[in-house]
Image (spheres, rainbow, N blue to C red):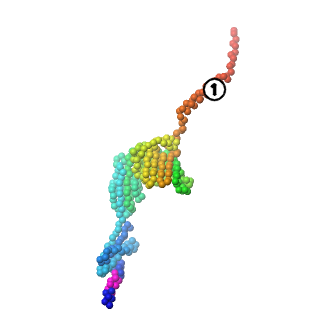
Amino acid sequence: MKNGKMLLPALLSIALVFSLTLPASATGASTTVPLPDYGSVFHWAVYGSRPPSAMVPNTPEGRVTPMVTVGWGGELARWNPYVSVEEYTLTISSTAGGTVTTPGEGSFTYTLNAVVDLMAQPEEGYRFVNWAGDVHTITDVTAAATNVTVRGNYSITANFVSVEAGNVGVKAGDWIKLEYKITGWPAGAPYAEWLKMEFLSVDETGITSRVTTRMSDGTEQSDTVPMEVGASGGGASGLSGLVISANLTTGDSIYLAGHGDLSIEGETTRTYAGAKRTVVYASISQYEGQLTYCWDKQTGVVVESSLTSDGLILTAKATETNMWKAATTQPPSWVWLIVAVVVAALAIVAYHRKKRKTPTIPTPPTEST
């Protein structure tokens, strides 16, 4: 009986704990806490000498009704709504030739979905090209004044280029065609056979081009692509490096969208579209592959590119253009000398044959007076 009297209070206290774990409204301490789209609310309850434990809050229609509970000694546990706010780091930098004035350069912390103004200011002799890096939530990557919506940890760079570097070497109406050769391509999958660029309009630093791609299944796709020459832009279909500034030399720096900054490694002479051309070239090791570009030095247009990656070899080479004339094949000078000697010999032989065949007409006698 004595044990039964001791067990009864223990059972009653256990029952009390569970029966009094009620919504706050049931205890006369009702309150509601707005729940932001980017946060969540936790309710921490203290059970006497036990560690705090988390309770699942009641969240009807995006709002929170905190719960209360009773500790072992019958004391009402305090509730403490805690809003967990997601924060991300936005890191901003710039290339030589300018700065980011808004919000500045460095690392900044923002909450999820914060809209941050961006302002890039070029120095004298330079111009703004574009924003690069984690730019998928930037409103306009080619505008110096724009904004970005923060939805993660982003690193963004403002690209500037020397005004002189934006030397456009093509004109409206120019076009060039490159043919592809591919090995290691999956069997049955369509691949590009050729690409043609037609330059529709040209200003001091930019080009509008129509890029047409012919696929092996007979289909063609055309895109109108704006290009910043200093940035060798071209965003449609992931195009990059189609045109750079004209007359660049070894060591000059260029920016390729999607690849970053690289330097011209050298120049050489090769034959493209039927004519010998001076070209500059550069290579990029990226994504476990090797990408090489060759650009015509005089115009800045790409004349050859190759990609090698994981058994895939893709090459593109210029085969036709209206920007230069295909050179006619001229025979060596010694050939012309032989031809001249033969022609002269034939002329001498023909002269002697004609002389022998010509009949002699006798001269009639004259009458004497």
Q: Which residues are magenta?
A: 8-17
Please tell me how crowded label 1 is: few (under 14), some (14-19), or many (20+) other residues with Cα within 10 Å: few
* Res. 314 in view: yes
| Residue 165 x/y as whole percent | 40, 45
Residue 346 drawn above or below residue 265: above
Magenta-drawn stretch contains 54:
no
- The image quadrant that residue 246 belongs to is top left
| Residue 82 x/y as whole percent | 33, 70
Closest to the observer, 22 or 309:
309
308 relative position to 29: left or right: right
Dominant SS type (magenta): helix
* Res. 324 in view: no
Residue pictured at 46% horizontal, 54% vertical = 238
Residue pictured at 43% horizontal, 47% vertical = 282
| Residue 63 x/y as whole percent | 37, 72
Q: In what element is the residue under mark 1?
A: helix
Closest to the observer, 201 or 269:
269
Residue pictured at 32% horizontal, 90% vertical = 1
| Residue 182 x/y as whole percent | 52, 51
For label 1, the residue is 350
